[in-house]
Image: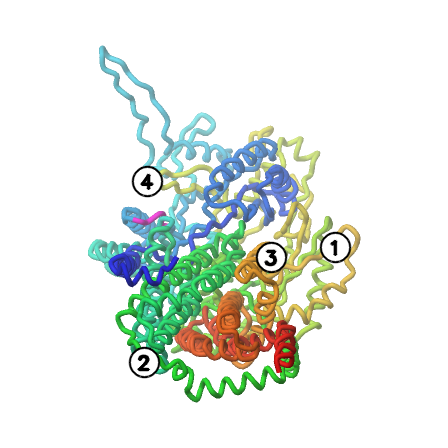
Amino acid sequence: MDIARGSIERPLYTWLIMLIALFGGIWGFMTLGRLEDPAFTIKEVIVITQYPGATAEQVALEVSEPLESAIQKMEEVDTITSTNRPGFSRINVEFKDTYDGNELPEIWTKLRARVRDAARGLPSGATQPMVNDSFGDVFGIFYAVTTPGFSDAEKYELSTYLRRELLTVSGVADVDVSGVPNETIYVEPDMALTTNLNMSVQTIANAIATSNSVTPAGELQAGPLKTRIQTPEGSDSVSEIAGLTVGSQGETINVIDVANVTRGREVDPSLFIRYQGEEAFTLGVSGVANENIVDVGHRVDAKLAELDSQIPYGVELHPIYQQHLVVEEASNNFLVNLAASVAIVIVVLAIFMGWRAAVVVGVTLLLTVVGTLLFMALFSIEMERISLGALIIAMGMLVDNAIVVAEGMQIAMHRGKNSRDAATEASGKTQIPLLGATVIGIMAFAGIGLSPDATGEFLFSLFAVIGISLLLSWLLALTVTPLLGHYFFKQGDGDSDEAYNSMLFRVYGTVLRAALKLRWLVVAGLVAVTVVCFAGFGMLKQQFFPNSNTPLFFVHFKLPQGTSIETTSDHMKVFEDWLEQREDVVSVATFVGQGATRFMLTYAAEQANPSYGHLIIRTEDIDAIPPLRADLDAFGRAQFPEGEFRTERLVFGPGGGAPIEARFSGPDPAVLRALAEQAMVALDGASDNVLNIRQDWREQELVLKPIYATDRAQTAGVTREDISNAMEFATNGLTTGVFRERERLIPIVMRQPHNGEFNLMNQVVFSSAAGSFVPVEQMIDGMGYEVENTLVHRRERVYTITVGADVTADVTAATVWNEVNSAIEAIDVPVGYQMEWGGEHENSANANASLGKQLPLSLLIMVLISVLLFNAIRQPIIIWLLVPMSVNGVVIGLMGTGLPFTFTALLGLLSLSGMLIKNGIVLVEEIDIVRRDEGLPLRDSIVKASVSRLRPVMLAAVTTILGMAPLMGDAFFVSMAVTIMGGLAFATVLTMVAAPVFYLIFFRGVERREQKAAVAAA
């Protein structure tokens, strides 16, 4: 089928294609959803259970173990880990990547049923487990709200108001409020009075507990009408709680007579948040899945501007992260890069092929890109980091098809053919090879995009966009390019030699003839260079994910386990004061007690721990981060040597964990701690590039344990629970009820006043047998001291301790892993225990294993297509021999720039392979055609065909290389850009020199027969 001639003879159809691509692409760009990262489901659920009074190991065995056993029976489960602290169990359940987002709700339901059934067997003191399946929600519009001079109650009212108003914005899925100070109503009995009155703490507690409750009061029916009876109004203020009456020994007295009632901030909060050193709370907004986050963000900004007049004076909203602005900037940068790439193509082609060819190819390229945007909109593929990267990758391959057709048509017309015949000749020779090469280029990415796991879900848009754009480029090269060539190209006088008679072609022909003559020397040289470059590839810095180009970095500060949150907060203020003096710091957000709300898909917050502090630091640009980070590291480690101070760059990839991790699993916590100590010593001695060596069980803590005097206590009717309640009453206080303030439930805590000297042994406990108070010290035989684990981790139902370490800024985790690997694996691990690697090594291995499962099938299909294209074996072998050599230019480029080989560089290498195979197919096909149609000797056929392919190959390479130049300033794409630029420069030499040499070697028998025939004829 002659598509090219048909596009000229029926121009209306071609113009329809052009107009649909142009205006449809503009419509697509305006309507495409915009996200920062691809819509991706984090297949993880958290199960949280409280077990007050239990040690961490009791929680692990009595709560986590039965729940994990039940969850493990689900075939969908991949990994189960748990964190156990005194009175608290947190189980993280990760599901297999092969389940997509549509299947997860059913899996969540199944998990809840399993947990609900298992909860019946938990100890009586354990709460009902809470299953949180929204763990992966991203709140990309993230503000810190400062409220100087506001009371805690007013802060709560403000946060509730802002959340309620923002939830009304179209496209907003949820609003997360964090860091609002919790209030508590404290009831502090006068122990002297209550003891004299023989009024137990429980008596007061019972009176308070139901003072604010809501219970049904029935209905009254009078005739045909039914009237509901409301519950009597309870206390609605602290003063009324103080006025409650309490019965004791036949008398009633007011609570205020025996206790002091106050309302204030909780004494032991779980989280402090500050912004620029000022107390704050955070407001995180998440958008509806697949919604255009840019539009949602601007609607949120408009709503906040609308609310500005209603928000009290002094309240300020400070952006910590604005995803919609990041995404909008990325989209705008893409447009700039697109315009620059198209301009580069036009300029280069104008120089080497004339302005007419430049216009023809430039318009085709532009229509291909905007047409791709149309199909992205039709197939609901959002503009995000991966799909934009796919368009940039495809740019290098899109221009090839149009150049090949335009150059062939231009040469044919120069020889005197009219536009229709020239289009037929140009497309007739190349449309099938170009189609096959295009499909091979697409298949290079099929293993990634069609992988049935998380890799495939995250990178599907890469495969889809490359597939759409390359197929569209082939179609437009056979329709739009011939029609535009018909309009712009001029018919020549029929001189067939002038087209390839310039200096460039003559020099290349001479060089190629020399290479063919010295073919074995050329092959030896190529093999030697390839061997050296493969050795150099092993020396390249390996980094799975590149650093982000967002000017943010983090500080993690950890004091010894058991440090109070107030002490941690005081330490963090020192860092805030130091950063305030730095001119290169734009803002600092402080979180004490836990990490921030997940404001990026790749951000993983640290779990709650009073001894943990976290800073999110924004600078003017990413260039300011390395020196600031170095100075801050030095200051932090010198200022508080007792703490663990480390900084972390934001990366394009999953966060959390350490770059270097080794896990030890087994039954005995003491043995695990000993193994961890050995590993920490081994890491420290194996490499100078490891920093902040740590283990995740942290330090053991000292605990006090009352020794229950069984005989005396039981005689007095005092139980172990009574002793525990007395101790809690004297320290943290007993939660005896809640105060209902509209939708808010404020806990009521009874505690002993701390207004003088405090002695834990000077407490009293109410004896039900005696009907009076007795001293606690008579019910116990003193206090015991124990050291215990207060942070216990399990993995797959086995105790697991993880030793982690960071790496210095100038080396990658892979380099350091190679340095420490042998030292860690030399540790003698006892029978029944196990060591395995985690961290970036595990992440890279899992990702590469996932790719490895799919790539063989893709490779097989690519080889099969190449064989079917030629209906032969030798030609495909020639082409595939070039592919390993493409690494040469990649190694030279990355080593020359000092950049690491990242995941994006791997994508660039796949793209490079596709370009090389396409050029090889077209060149080898051209040699076959010249041999078949013109009957020239083998060497002459090789030289003539290669000379005819020189210009399109060179132009495609130059335009692609220069088109990648704008990406050199992008942190995410720079490694990929260098990979394609360096690799393509070398691949061009491979195509135009190595391929002809290999062709001559493989078809040497043909040349021998030609020589024998010539001798016989002579």
In the displayed structure, would residue 708 be above or below residue 180? above
Q: Mark 3 vs mark 4: which is more N-terminal? A: 4
SS category of the residue bearing label 3? helix
Element assignment for label 2: loop
As measured in the structure, the alpha-carbon distance from the residue carrying label 1 to the one carrying label 2 is: 90 Å
**Foreground disc of the pair 3, 1:** 3
Across and down, in percent, residue 762 comes to 58, 46
Q: Circle 4 is placed at which residue position?
A: 237
Q: Which residue range is magenta in the image?
A: 171-175
Q: Earlier in the sequence, mark 4 or mark 1?
A: 4
User: Which residue is at the front of the view, 657 or 791?
Assistant: 657
- Classify mark 4: residues with Cα within 10 Å, few (<14), some (14-19) or many (20+): some
Please state which amino acid type lies under the numbered disc 1: Val
| Colour treatment of the image | rainbow
Tell me, yes or no, whether the two marked residues, 1 and 2, touch with CB atoms within 8 Å: no
Give the residue pinned by disc 2: 493
Q: Which mark is residue 671?
A: 1
Q: Which mark is residue 856?
A: 3
Residue 402 on image: x %, y %: 38, 68
Identity, as a three-letter code, of the amino acid under mark 3: Pro
Residue 592, x across and y down, in percent = 47, 59
Q: Earlier in the sequence, mark 2 or mark 3?
A: 2
Callout 4: SS: loop
Of callouts 4 and 2, the N-terminal one:
4
Measured in 3D between alpha carbons, the distance from the residue under mark 3 to the one under mark 1, in whole angstroms, is 43 Å
Q: Nearer the viewer, mark 1 or mark 2?
A: 2
CA neighbours of label 3 inside 10 A, class few (<14), some (14 to 19), many (20+): few
